[in-house]
Image (cartoon, rainbow, N blue to C red):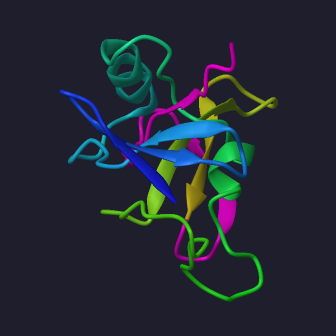
Amino acid sequence: MTVRITPNMLIWIDAKTGLEWEVVPLKKSVNWDEAMSYAESLESGWRVPTVDELQMLLNRSKFGPVLRRDCPLPFHSSCYWSSTVYTGSTRYAWYVYFGSSAAYCSNKREKHCVYCVRDIYRG
């Protein structure tokens, strides 16, 4: 497990997915638009993860709220926004409920927590 410290952030480098994750998420629940704005306010390249990226954090061999063993991310709430918009209506987006290790749709006005992620630069 590799964790990197920058002047503004603690970052976990996930070798399995090739992503960098913000270790300490925003401390309050926000609606989807606020989550997107928060990600844009961070250093270059940060974004809200897709629903698939969030689900890659889960240990699917166990029942309940279990993150992968190598995942150091704490979770302050059970529900985390993804950037994935529901194809049936742009008023809805997907979130992952870590309590059941499942993804659900929610109105974008609902409030959930958010982690930010970015691709590891491979130059």
The quadrant in which residue 119 appears is: top right
Q: Where's the C terminus, which quadrant?
A: top right
Residue nearest the viewer, comparing 81 with 68:
68
Describe residue 33's horizontal placement relative to residue 87 as left or right: left
Residue nearest the viewer, comparing 43 with 81:
43
- Above or below, 110 relative to 74: above
- Above or below, 101 relative to 4: below
Query: Magenta: predominant secondary structure element?
Result: loop
- Above or below, 99 relative to 3: below
The quadrant in which residue 55 appears is: bottom right
Q: Residue at x 41, y 60 (%)?
A: 73
Outermost residue toward the front?
A: 123
Residue nearest the viewer, comparing 27 with 69:
69
Place of residue 90 in the rendered image (x, y in percent of width and height, measured from the top left): 67, 22
Place of residue 111 in the rendered image (x, y in percent of width and height, measured from the top left): 36, 44
Q: Is residue 115 magenta?
A: yes
- Above or below, 49 relative to 39: below
**Residue 104 appears anywhere in the view:** no
Place of residue 103 in the rendered image (x, y in percent of width and height, measured from the top left): 68, 57
Q: Is residue 105 magenta?
A: yes
Q: Residue at x 31, y 14 (%)?
A: 41
The quadrant in which residue 50 appears is: top right
Residue stretch in magenta: 98-123
Outermost residue toward the bottom?
A: 63
**Residue 3 appears anywhere in the view:** yes
Describe residue 62's horizontal placement relative to residue 72 as left or right: right
Residue nearest the viewer, comparing 66 with 82:
66
Q: Residue at x 36, y 49 (%)?
A: 23
Q: Residue at x 61, y 71 (%)?
A: 68
Q: How many marks?
A: 0
